[in-house]
Amino acid sequence: MATEMLGSEVAKSMKEGLINETKELEEKGIHPNLTIIRVGARPDDLSYERGAKKRMEITGIGCQVLELPEDISQADFEEEFRKVNEDDSVHGILLFNPLPKSLDIAPVKAMINPLKDMDCLSAINVAKVFTGDASGFAPCTPEAVMDMLDYYSIDLTGKKVTLVGRSMVVGKPLAMMLLGKHATLTICHTRTKDLPGTCRQAEVLVAAAGKAKMITEDMVGENAVVVDVGINVDADGNLCGDVDYEHVKEKASYISPVPRGVGNVTTSVLADHVLRAAKALNGI
Ligand code: NDP
């Protein structure tokens, strides 16, 4: 029976440090501050927004949401974004995406100040992730996966790690971070031949495909570490991950549940990014 890798435990271990860092900045007259930009009201975004606001509140970081109508024009969207980007009281910007189909994200990716870019939109931060330059902002979710592995002392050096998913939000940046920890990496996607066999070889299996319970027990090697990044809704309308948790937990050595897993760490990583941004923007 696997040890559960609980996001709440990881977040708890980060909490005090984040609160203290916020206090130190406040004492210097700097009020760390995040603006979330949301276009429309997708349930996923609203759920993440609630978690992020709560985490910022616990940490003492200012947080406001700029809610824009789903039918906003491209020009108005860019203008609203520009105002936040140029507002000196805002240290971090989190833009929820995907955006409505009528909007193009490319101009704001080019516009965002890389120092305020909390979730790796700008090409500069993407390049830093891919070159292993820790001064950039990686996307929060892959960083949360790495924090979770670190908290549970999972040594990745030389380990056979299989990652299912190759998106720019999770899979690809996470692949770079895992390589940075000297994992021997296999990246799977929809064209992978023999996905079950490839997954079974893994000593550490990370699922980030967005397919409810697709990683079944027969796809997991004995005593593997299984990290589930997926957030899905199952046939009964319940939140679930990409891993068939109930069965896989009997075989794995460590497993992260959904909910209560990686998602709980992501907002702590976001808070850390806001504090780093507040420092960088103030020359600290
Ligand atoms: P995307 O849909 O952008 O990417 C999914 C990736 O998984 C693609 O590379 C795709 O392959 C691959 N994939 C999909 N189905 C299969 C399959 N059946 N077999 C093998 N590979 C497959 O999703 P995201 O990366 O944005 O998100 C992945 C999951 O993580 C989602 O459930 C999302 O909700 C969750 N998520 C969780 C967060 C958190 O904080 N915990 C934050 C962000 C996302 P291909 O490239 O060939 O299409």
Image (cartoon, rainbow, N blue to C red):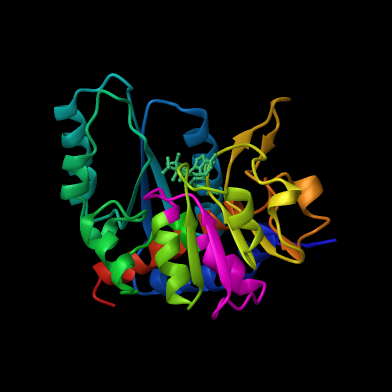
The quarter of the picture where the N terminus appears is bottom right
Q: Is residue 148 magenta?
A: yes
Q: Residue at x 42, y 75 (%)?
A: 180
Q: In the orientation shown, which residue stands out farthest toward the top?
A: 71
* x, y percent for residue 165: 48, 49
* x, y percent for residue 182: 48, 78
Q: Is residue 48 left or right of residue 259?
A: left
Q: Residue at x 42, y 48 (%)?
A: 63
The quarter of the picture where the C terminus appears is bottom left
Q: Residue at x 57, y 70 (%)?
A: 160
Depth check: give the residue in front, 126 or 220.
Answer: 220
Q: Is residue 283 above or below residue 260?
A: below
* x, y percent for residue 215: 66, 46
Depth check: give the residue in front, 126 or 15.
Answer: 126
Q: Is residue 15 visible?
A: no
Q: Residue at x 53, y 67 (%)?
A: 146
Depth check: give the residue in front, 230 or 263.
Answer: 230
Q: Is residue 35 above or below residue 156?
A: above
Q: Is residue 104 magenta?
A: no
Q: Is residue 267 above or below residue 24?
A: above
Q: Is residue 187 left or right of residue 76?
A: right
* x, y percent for residue 203: 65, 68
Q: Is residue 15 above or below residue 33?
A: below
Tell me how many marks there are. 0
Q: Is residue 95 visible?
A: yes
Magenta-drawn segment: 144-171
